[in-house]
Amino acid sequence: MLEKAKLFFELDRSVKQFTTLAEVGTLLNSTLDQNVVRKMAMEAITRLMNAEVGSLLLVDDENKELYFEVALGDKGERVKEIRLKIGEGIAGWVAEHGKSLLLQDVRKDPRFYKSADQKTEFVTRDMVCVPVKVKDKVIGVLQAINRAEGVFTEDDVELFQLFSNQVAIALDNARLYEEIRETFFATAEALAEAIEKRDPYTGGHTKRVVNYCLVAAKYLNLTPEELEILKLSAILHDVGKIGVEDRILRKPGNLDDEEAKIMKMHPLLGAEIMRHIRQLKDLIPGMLHHHERPDGKGYPEGLKGMDIPIVARIISAADTYDAMTTNRPYRKGLSRQTAIDEIKKEAGTQFDKEVAEAFVKAFEAGEIEMEAETG
């Protein structure tokens, strides 16, 4: 009877562990943000392994060291200050050899790095330490420390290795996504610079507009997704000028009515370009409407107030502020204070009130001036 009860207990425990493992795997693959993946992995360790503490150390290839990217528990922040040489301590050994370790009495192992416990005032009793591998290369080490009941066993090692495989896949996917994202941003910036070079009077305009948008956005409670769309939309807001003739772009004086009409087509042209790229469809609202005004006197559709997308409202203020403060052949640029006063004055007519307030706050905090100098 006791044997049956024990078997039932072990079976129930295994089912719960593998159910948790499946749930964790789904969670890990639900995001492509590396920081979120790392945090999720750590939160899962304590739950999956019934551990007091979990940690993730990543390999710093350049310095041949391990560093604590994420460590949870009340000593987590102190742990993150520690760096280990590859081969140093238990985690260093695992990173060097690419093999898992089960230590049921850590202090009896000569590889144990006592300084970590001394620095954090933590007492390590038992531990499972497994490598995180991508294509047979160790990119990090996972640690589960101090089992809540009893000590870790070989079954725990097997479970932790399966978990490590999931973490490796999620981290690699997030890394690849980040590389693609960075390449895409670089390509978008190169395209914007190429268009700028056709207009000798707007050098650095795009970079400044992007910077102004991002500092103002800090006061507008945008989501990470909205910030991403804002940044890309700001980079490409003038891409439609690729369809405007050089004689108009390069004209040193004021445009006549016909030329102004052609120039006002650039938001439509930019939006049309984006419509042909499925992945960039979210950029269309910001690009198409960044010359709209709350009073309905903007273009191309004469939208009013809140009908204008928030991204477009932010780009509009940033674009106009840069235009006001930049020297042109036919006029000298306004001072930054005069330009910000103009944004205050036109809040609710030319500029969205909330966006205007955000620009004023950023200006008063010195952030607008700083971005103007770095741009």
Image (spheres, rainbow, N blue to C red):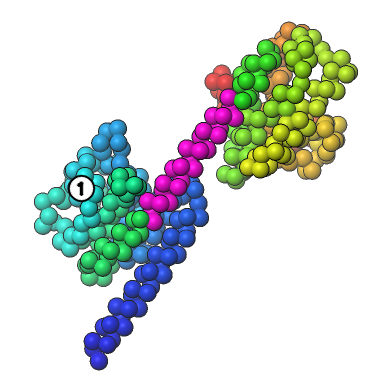
The answer to whether 285 appears left or right of 186 in the picture is: right
Q: Residues within 10 Å of mark 1 (few under 14, many from 20)?
A: few
Q: Is residue 178 magenta?
A: yes
- Is residue 136 depicted above or below 359 in this figure? below
Q: Which region is colored magenta?
A: 166-190
Q: Nearer the viewer, residue 170 or 6?
A: 170
Residue 60 spot, x, y in % from top left: 31, 38
75 relative to 316, above or below: below
Q: Quadrant of the C terminus?
A: top right
Kindly identify the residue that appears in the image at 83 percent across and 38 percent down.
303
The answer to whether residue 337 of the structure is visible from this angle is no
**Where residue 118 sits: x, y (%)?**
19, 48
Residue at 63% of width from left, 29% of height from top?
235
The extreme bottom residue here reads 1
- Indicate the secondary structure of the residue bearing disc 1: helix
Q: Is residue 328 left or right of residue 86?
A: right
The three-letter code of the residue at mark 1 reads: His
The answer to whether residue 113 of the structure is visible from this angle is yes
* Spot occupied by residue 343 in the image (x, y as percentages of width and height): 73, 27
Q: Is residue 36 magenta?
A: no
Disc 1 target residue? 97
The residue at the point 21 percent across, 44 percent down is 96
Q: Quadrant of the N terminus?
A: bottom left
Q: Residue placed at 46% from the left, 46% from the top?
A: 174
Rendered view: 130 above or below 195: below
Q: Residue 268 or 143: which is nearer the viewer?
A: 268
Q: For this rendering, which residue is in front, 189 or 316?
A: 189
Quarter of the rendering containing residue 230? top right
